Image (spheres, coloured by chain):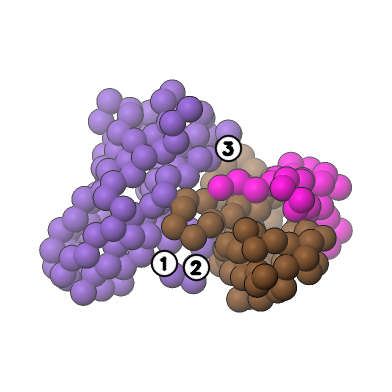
Amino acid sequence: EAGVAQSPRYKIIEKRQSVAFWCNPISGHATLYWYQQILGQGPKLLIQFQNNGVVDDSQLPKDRFSAERLKGVDSTLKIQPAKLEDSAVYLCASSLDTIYEQYFGPGTRLTVT
Amino acid sequence: GDSVTQMEGPVTLSEEACLTINCTYTATGYPSLFWYVQYPGEGLQLLLKATKADDKGSNKGFEATYRKETTSFHLEKGSVQVSDSAVYFCALEAAGNNRKLIWGLGTSLAVNP
């Protein structure tokens, strides 16, 4: 079975620019998560989708971050405008449903200069 | 709120040495406990888990026992290999309908030949 796919793997942008990340979850997985992992820290949940609805976005900085999951499959996470402190690895994970194991993609490493 | 504390790294060991990475937690109710591993350049992978007190999770020679009395879930391996070099994360899954994962900061392990 194919795993969680993410692109791009690496991205370097200047502050105040915008960037978008894409995630394709495992087929049939209803729940999709976006995490931010700053170097030396554990992942921080940014947003959780159940199909195409948002379950939890309490830690998403909504003034600059947005995410969508159209048709309940692929998802995009956007940052506009980026700040230096947004430099991190952005992880996407999916699970069959909210009570099942999460499977993680390889992540997108974002560097904001 | 719920939290996870794990020992700081980096940990450097010689091949075939014994490994213990400490993890303690604070939680209401009875959370499930996990160890995830992140190999260089890869996404997070579930290493093992335990869902109730006194359960022992095991995988790839690693073990961890859910100790309710000491609120701990220490990761152990009797003989590490160079291929075990990675970052290890302890996490708990809060009880309830929305199984949010609460993460430790991660412990980096380097095994030298």
Residue B16: horizontal and vertical position, in percent? 78, 65
Chain B colour is brown
Closer to the camera in the image, B30 or B37: B37
- Find the distance from the CA under tag 3 to the CA under tag 1: 23 Å
Residue indicated by mark 1? A38
- Location of the C terminus of chain A by quadrant is bottom left
Closer to the camera in the image, B85 or B100: B85
Secondary structure, mark 1, is loop
Q: Chain of mark 2?
A: A
Residue A71: horizontal and vertical position, in percent? 27, 25
Q: How many marks?
A: 3
Q: Is residue B113 magenta?
A: no
Residue indicated by mark 2? A41
Residue indicated by mark 3? A101
Decide: marks 2, 3 in contact (CB < 8 A)? no
Chain A colour is purple
Q: Is residue B52 magenta?
A: yes
Residue A93: horizontal and vertical position, in percent? 44, 43
Please give left or right for residue B16 compared with residue A27 in the image: right
Examine the rendered structure and indicate whether residue B109 appears above or below residue B43. Answer: below
Residue at left offset 28%, top offset 46%? A7
Residue A13: horizontal and vertical position, in percent? 18, 65
Query: What range of the chain is rendered magenta?
Result: B45-72
Extreme left residue here? A17
- For the residue marked with disc 1, what is the amino acid? Ile
Instruction: Respond whether the residues carrying marks 3 and 1 are from the same subunit.
Output: yes
Q: Chain of mark 1?
A: A
- Find the distance from the CA under tag 2 to the CA under tag 3: 21 Å
